[in-house]
Amino acid sequence: MSAEAENEATAPPQPKRTVAYISWVALALMTTSSVASLRPSPTMAVYGLASIFLYVVPAIVFLLPTALVSAELASGWSGGVYNWVSEGLSKPMGFLAVWCQFAMTIFYYPSLLGFVASTLAYVINPDLASSGVWTAIVIMVCYWAGVWVSSRGTSGVAGLASGGLIIGTLVPGALLVILGIAFLGQGHESAAPMTASHLLPAWAGLSSLVLIVNNFLSYSGMEMNAVHVSSLRKPGREFPRAMFMAMGLVLLIFILPALAISWIVPADQLSLTAGVMQAFDAVFAAFDSQWLTPILGVMLVAASLGGMLTWLAGPSRGLLLISRQEGYLPPFLQRLNKHGVQQNILVTQGLVTTVIALAYAFIPDVSSVYWIFSVITTQVYLIMYLLMFVAAVRLRRNQPDHPRGYKAPMLTALCGVGFAASLAALLIGFVPSSQFGGGSVGVYLAIVAGGALGLGLLVPYLFYRLRKPSWKEAS
């Protein structure tokens, strides 16, 4: 027996690595917490009963394919969407994908904080909810405060977001539905018709479909939850169960509050940013309890700000790591502060966010600005999903033997449905919504095309073409 073999024979047995498994129910709840929100409810409440259709269709053609496809990718390739697209397509396309994942936040923050401004107005003075100047000030103050918190490397930001789910989403959502039912039970007539003939949205050409685009953004982010597929004992059986359960819970959280708002606030009076607070204020007035309105407003603001802090650190960190590895960004944007935070990226993004926020001050209709920013956010994010679906098909075809903890059923069909739905949503976003027919179509197209195509395609192209070897060495 050799000395090496003797040592192996006499060495104490090494303990097996234990895997911290989670149940499929826990994964379903985790997914629900990261996707569900009350923020898009007013957008769909203008459609009343048809909001059910407008939520269910994107869930089937986008949410489900995204969840199952990203689960296969996450169980076979670490590193997130950059590695998936780089392996399946090319490194430049991988950079484009991770750039879009980051760039969507540039317009996401103004739309999210526009909701915060309108909600906060009901705590101070409801008349401020329609003030563009107030909205712009709140966006800038909240964003730069978030940059200050994030740049100091403060821990526990994720805890703020998870606590915000309960405080600012589940409790207010359940309360809104219960009060809405009580409101109808007292004999008040629903502001929106609740008959079978209103199950489908009224058809007024392509413009009547535009609001469905916002729901693609509502369901986005599933690729981030897919990393947990390896924590299931039987991924092939349990992951689909978790996703179907999550989809059901998300639909309930989206649909029921939207219906409750449509019962209470007439569509022609509904603000897309302040609709949730309008509903609470009206129903509390009906029960002589308007003193509760500011309390609910604080709860909703807390949830939104917690979510913003989480998003502020995540996508920009991913872009930084890839850029330092491959030299995609100039050295200035690759630098870290003393806390190891990508402060220069956050500050540069903040300057752009400040300019965007000023649009609220100069465009009279706050709801229109909110909608435009939501469309741009969705379209930039959809570019990343288009790349992900194509990469998944190529990886299944070119690397069929690569180990995967989970294999999505009918992957090519799922990717085909997801790609077609994403492309349709991206194109439909260029059509002005029927809810905003009074504005200039040319101005709308210029803003949306400039924002989505310029930020989503032109800027990363310029970074890639202008890159220098020294950018990689500087990292």
Image: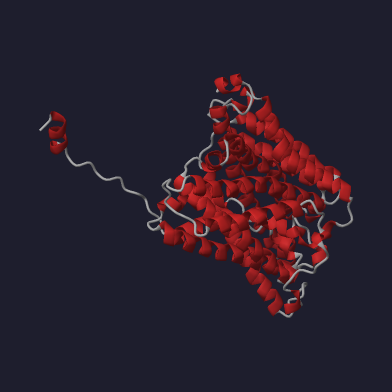
In this view, 394 is above or below 319: below
Identify which residue, 256 or 92, lies in the foreground.
92
Residue 69 picture location, percent across and down: 53, 53
In this view, 337 is above or below 358: above
Residue 406 picture location, percent across and down: 44, 54
Extreme-left residue of the structure:
1
Quadrant of the image occupied by residue 187: bottom right
In this view, 346 is above or below 167: above
Count of numbered circles in the view: 0
Quadrant of the image occupied by residue 341: top right
Identify which residue, 372 or 358, lies in the foreground.
372
The residue positioned 72% from the left and 33% from the top of the image is: 351
Q: Is residue 137 visible?
A: no
Describe residue 401's horizontal placement relative to residue 462 as left or right. left
The residue positioned 67% from the left and 31% from the top of the image is: 347
Q: Is residue 368 visible?
A: yes
Q: The N terminus lies in which quarter of the figure?
A: top left
Q: The C terminus lies in which quarter of the figure?
A: top right
The residue positioned 87% from the left and 57% from the top of the image is: 437
Identify which residue, 212 or 326, lies in the foreground.
326
Identify which residue, 153 or 61, lies in the foreground.
61
Residue 396 picture location, percent across and down: 50, 49
The residue positioned 80% from the left and 49% from the top of the image is: 369
